[in-house]
Amino acid sequence: MRIGLVVDSACDLPLDYLQRHDVTILPITVRIGEAVLADHRNEQATLEFLHAHVAERGAEAETMPFTVQQIHDLFLERLVIDYDHVFCMTITRSRSPIFDNATQAGFSILNDYRPVRSAAGHDTPFALRVIDTQNLFAAQGITAVEAIRLREAGEGPPKIRARLEHLALHTHGYMIPRDLYYLRARARKKNDRSVGLLSAALGSALDIKPVLRGYRGETGPVAKIKGFEPAVEKLFAFTIARIHAGLMTPTVCLSYGGELEEMRMLPGYHDLERTCADNNIELFESVMSLTGMVNVGKGALVVGFAAENSPAFG
């Protein structure tokens, strides 16, 4: 059976890795004033757009995910021909309409695919499953990497579906933003009251950085640490401890809102890199998606991994 995999462009994995494993990307378009860029996970284009626009007016940006019709058309033009069963893994539905759009499109796709497949010489059924990863950015990558591994191991759709849905329940994403004022301005643009003016002002004045966790569709602070670099060092140390305790998959994903060389110079990075190598953990690093950067700001760091028993951050 030919199994296809789809992610949206907020899923922070390297483009060459996604291309090498034939993973289809649902792009998210970002508009800032008159400037428009469809995010296809091109890191160079993202960095150029970042330096030109995000730092100045990113909080005003509009993000436009694929509509129901666009998803429908993508599947009928290509995916229902190239594959027999497709898993579409999306950013958490609590933060984006992509899951709902893909689910709605799925009903019409399953009604309309037969003539298209028949014309291409396929008389077997087509199936589509939309998976809510229940997380964001680098943490989305955990589910996608596991889907690739399972497909390459020759597993069938029932086992892949059960594994991905179970994994989504145990995926943890941790983010440290650099600029709380930016985060608050962006939250206000989206009518999200989670970052108040007082906390932003106090945090910036005292250089206090929150550590935010994404888990089962919910996002919220789990710690406040003075200084961005000390916060990052503590997050890397926490991740190392989780590796030693045992992860559900041999995968850690990192994404950074800027040049990756900047991220690799942060305290604790090389300890994490060495720990991953010593424990046969694959470490994925990518420039944060443009969608991620306009939502959380330039210079933010995200770490994702899956663990059944992850204790409180500390």
Image: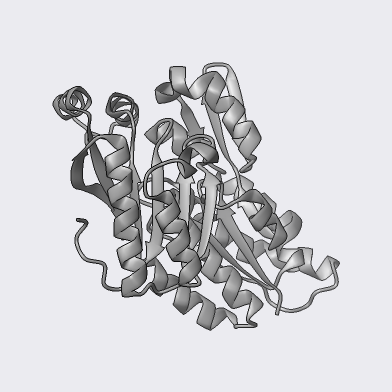
Give how far across and how far down residue 64 sits, in percent. Answer: 52, 36
* Frontmost residue, 18 versus 252: 252
| Above or below, comparing residue 213 to residue 122 in the picture | above
| Above or below, comparing residue 29 to residue 214 in the picture | above
Q: Quadrant of the N terminus?
A: bottom right
* Frontmost residue, 234 versus 293: 234
Tell me which residue sits at (55%, 70%) in the image. 147
Whether residue 132 is visible: no
Quarter of image, res 178? top left
User: As drawn, is 275 to the left or to the right of 31?
Assistant: left
Tell me which residue sits at (68%, 77%) in the image. 125
Quarter of image, res 202? top left
* Frontmost residue, 105 versus 271: 271
Give how far across and how far down residue 116 sits, in percent. Answer: 77, 63
Whether residue 29 is visible: yes
Give how far across and how far down residue 62 sits, in percent. Answer: 47, 28
User: As drawn, is 212 to the left or to the right of 119?
Assistant: left
Q: Quadrant of the C terminus?
A: bottom left
User: As drawn, is 35 to the left or to the right of 233?
Assistant: right
